[in-house]
């Protein structure tokens, strides 16, 4: 048998072309995925990053600020719509913008997505850097841009970063769930709960009760050098003190209203971070008195009175548009590369009676400074409604008002005229903190007029003698350098300004004033009012009535956080010394030689002043030449009379180097007004600055 033929050898593999690329070692696929799967991946990555940059920080701040929704009188539906908008709208907007780049081809789409990822990572780096590093401003932006570019390159080169982002897309739904079911704001967005216990009657009648709670008012702002109410600046507070018991050693229990006011109305120290809502505090003043008293309550950033005790006053809500606009301002604060105190309460501006569409509750007072009819319209709407309700009734009535005055934002002159100011004007630092104090004191002087109108109305209606009248404030605020505000630093550095508040109680029939320096803490308010109303509080309280013996300890309990009391030493604080006004203020100045220039942001407002609108350009701000050294004094005059002397300071975030407050409305006249800015020389010689 013949041998089998040998097997034919395998054909050699074709040699690769000479210009072929070597095999890829990149773990990422050689080609970008295409079609709807690719777009879904990109959408998940964008959702994860937008969730970290926008959704989480926004819902975190709003979740800890139920007062945001209460102040704006939002319905649960409006609040839920806002949450949905925060969670979905930015993601969809960014995703659609990126998807539009697909029209230019797959390569352009991939590049656009990489760019979006880099920008969002840079925005995230700004927030992380602001919280974790001392960098601010331009240096932080440079670092954030570098981090975003590096992150985008890594995302483009490797598969791992994209996978991590797609897993992180579960974050936004989790952030929404935490907001709705675990945050303090959940009680407002998804309200529940019943009514607390009503108090039992004790021997005695039930007199009318008028309770007015002001906001952000340190006791020391009212005091003169002698430790008494400064009657020249605040005649109506002095009048109130002259006919009531002034508890001069009174302190609030927290620098944050959503903790301070519930403590005042429940008689209990803050123990947990809860919404200032009746579902969280069912036992409070309104429920204790509600069984025997009619309740007329004007609350601002709380909702402690349950609907069965008092319905919301018939006033238009501010609506979803306002929620969206204020949330946008909050987002700008959160994403800015500069230091910012994220405090929604700082933007709570009381609407005027005119803005709320309310008719004037009272005629214009017989006072020469109230010379414009519109000033009555400038009353805060809540105050106008409160005044209108101060009338005798067949049933005992509690008239309650929490008024955000003289709380920032400051916008009123002592006369009641309004003025405009930038939202981002600093309140701290050289020059700025003095300006903040001046604006606070001016708004306090206007608040004094509101106290006067309250006393006048009570007397005119016959309620004054019969009623128990209580006027106080929930907390103060510090104007010390490097400790402005009411946070932990301010409490440590200037507790006398943050914790001590005015506290006046006029009992029914009381006519003579007296001073009581017992250790009053604001948990004493509820038991004191209940005693005056002859109602027994049916739950345990931490406070004690002013009709009981004073507490033996002298120190104070103050809560920056619920359940974590700070112990402050007792004693009545003294007013910090105030620098006297510059000798030039109030003097007449003529034309002077020009030496330099200044840029005034609101210069056009002086060309056509109309006092009948109730608004005046009483705040002047701008900048000067870079050659003008910090500390140089500027004199600001209107119609030839100096209204303020202020220093030049380093530029703020808006480039402003000076701001002058002109609280005397007699400087202005109808029509065109002349504004002059002078530079003071070493011997107080004046040189005009040309204005632009």
Image (tube, rainbow, N blue to C red):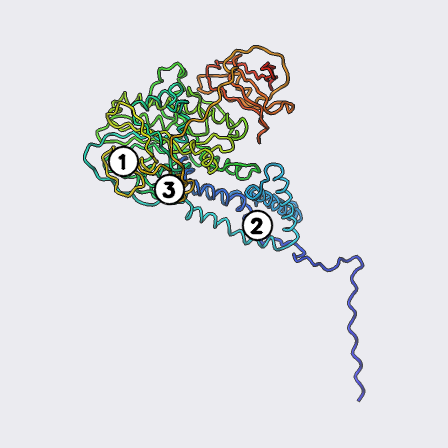
How busy is the neighbourhood of tag 3: few (under 14 within 10 Å), some, or many (20 plus)?
Answer: many
Mark 1 in CB contact with mark 2 (< 8 angstroms)? no
Q: CA distance from mark 1 to mark 2?
A: 65 Å
Which residue of the protein is positioned furthest toward the bottom in this rendering? 1
Q: Nearer the viewer, mark 3 or mark 2?
A: 3
Percent x, y for residue 240? 32, 23
Viewer-nearest residue: 686 or 422: 686
Q: Nearer the viewer, residue 449 or 320?
A: 449
Foreground of the two, 264 or 185: 264
First-in-chain label (1 vs 2): 2
Residue behind mark 3: 270
| Residue shown at the point (57%, 20%) measured from the top left | 633
Q: Which residue bears the numbered disc 2?
A: 45
Which of the two residues, 195 or 129, is positioned nearer the viewer here?
129
Q: In the rendering, which numbered label is found on residue 692?
A: none
Residue 420 to residue 284: above or below: above
Element type where label 1 sits in the image: loop
For the C terminus, which image quadrant?
top right
In the rendered view, does 589 fall on the left or right side of 394? right
Q: Residues within 10 Å of mark 2 (few under 14, many from 20)?
A: many
* Number of other residues with Cα within 10 Å of mark 1, as a class: few under 14, some 14 to 19, many 20 or more: few
Residue 685, image x, y percentages: 59, 14
Q: With 59 as the anchor, is 361 left or right in this view? A: left
Query: What secondary structure is found at the residue carrying circle 2?
Result: helix
Residue 634 lies left or right of residue 530; in this view the side is right
Residue under label 1, please give it.
Answer: 549
Mark-to-mark CA distance, 3 and 2: 41 Å
């Amino acid at each position: 048998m013949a041998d089998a033929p040998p097997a034919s050898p395998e054909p050699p593999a074709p040699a690769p072309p000479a210009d072929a690329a070597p095999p890829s070692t990149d773990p990422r696929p050689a080609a970008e995925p295409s079609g709807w799967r690719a777009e879904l991946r990109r959408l998940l990555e964008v959702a994860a990053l937008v969730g970290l940059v926008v959704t989480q920080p926004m819902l975190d701040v709003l979740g800890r600020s139920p007062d945001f929704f209460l102040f704006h009188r939002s319905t649960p539906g409006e609040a839920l719509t806002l949450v949905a908008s925060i969670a979905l709208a930015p993601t969809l907007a960014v995703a659609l913008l990126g998807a539009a780049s697909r029209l230019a081809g797959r390569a352009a789409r991939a590049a656009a997505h990489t760019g979006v990822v880099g920008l969002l990572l840079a925005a995230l780096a700004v927030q992380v850097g602001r919280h974790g590093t001392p960098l601010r401003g331009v240096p932080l932006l440079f670092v954030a841009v570098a981090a975003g570019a590096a992150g985008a390159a890594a995302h483009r080169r490797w598969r791992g970063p994209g996978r991590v982002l797609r897993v992180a897309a579960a974050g936004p739904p989790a952030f929404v769930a935490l907001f709705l079911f675990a945050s303090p704001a959940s009680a407002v967005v998804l309200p529940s709960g019943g009514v607390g216990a009503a108090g039992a009657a004790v021997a005695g009648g039930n007199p009318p009760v008028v309770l007015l709670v002001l906001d952000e008012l340190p006791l020391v702002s009212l005091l003169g050098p002698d430790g008494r109410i400064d009657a020249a600046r605040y005649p109506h507070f002095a009048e109130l003190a002259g006919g009531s018991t002034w508890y001069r050693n009174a302190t609030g229990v927290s620098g944050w209203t959503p903790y301070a006011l519930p403590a005042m109305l429940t008689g209990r120290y803050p123990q947990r971070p809860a919404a200032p809502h009746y579902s969280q505090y069912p036992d409070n003043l309104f429920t204790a008195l509600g069984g025997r008293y009619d309740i007329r309550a004007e609350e601002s950033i709380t909702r402690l009175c349950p609907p069965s005790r008092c319905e919301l006053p018939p006033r238009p809500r501010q609506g979803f548009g306002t929620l969206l606009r204020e949330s946008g301002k909050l987002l700008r604060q959160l994403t800015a590369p500069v230091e910012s105190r994220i405090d929604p309460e700082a933007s709570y501006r009381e609407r005027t009676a005119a803005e709320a569409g309310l008719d004037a509750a009272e005629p214009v007072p017989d006072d020469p400074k109230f010379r414009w009819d519109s000033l009555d319209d400038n009353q805060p709407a809540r105050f106008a409604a409160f005044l209108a309700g101060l009338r005798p009734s067949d049933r005992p009535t509690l008239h309650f008002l929490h008024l955000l005055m003289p709380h920032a934002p400051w916008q009123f002159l002592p006369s009641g005229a309004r003025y405009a100011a930038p939202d981002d004007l600093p309140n701290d630092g050289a020059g700025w903190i003095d300006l903040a104090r001046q604006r606070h004191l001016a708004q306090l002087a206007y608040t004094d007029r509101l106290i006067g109108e309250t006393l006048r109305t009570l007397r005119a209606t016959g309620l004054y003698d019969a009623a128990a009248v209580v006027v106080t404030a929930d907390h103060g605020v510090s104007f010390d350098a490097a400790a402005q505000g009411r946070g932990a630093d301010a409490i440590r550095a200037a507790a006398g300004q943050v914790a001590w508040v005015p506290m006046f109680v006029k009992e029914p029939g009381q006519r003579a004033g007296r001073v009581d320096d017992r250790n009053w803490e604001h948990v004493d308010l509820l038991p004191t009012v209940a005693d005056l109303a002859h109602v027994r509080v049916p739950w345990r309280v931490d406070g004690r009535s002013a009709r009981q013996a004073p507490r033996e300890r002298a120190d104070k309990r103050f809560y920056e956080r619920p359940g974590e009391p700070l112990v402050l030493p007792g004693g009545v604080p003294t007013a910090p010394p105030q620098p006297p006004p510059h000798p030039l203020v109030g003097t007449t100045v003529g034309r002077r030689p020009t030496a330099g220039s200044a840029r005034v942001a609101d210069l056009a407002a002086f060309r056509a002043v109309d006092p009948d609108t109730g608004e005046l350009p009483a705040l002047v701000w701008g900048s000067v030449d870079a050659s003008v050294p910090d500390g140089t004094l500027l004199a600001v005059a209107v119609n030839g009379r100096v209204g303020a002397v202020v220093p030049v300071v380093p530029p703020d975030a808006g480039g402003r180097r000076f701001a002058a407050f002109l609280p005397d409305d007699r400087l202005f006249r109808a029509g065109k007004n002349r504004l002059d800015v002078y530079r003071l020389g070493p011997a107080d010689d004046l040189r005009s600055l040309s204005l632009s």
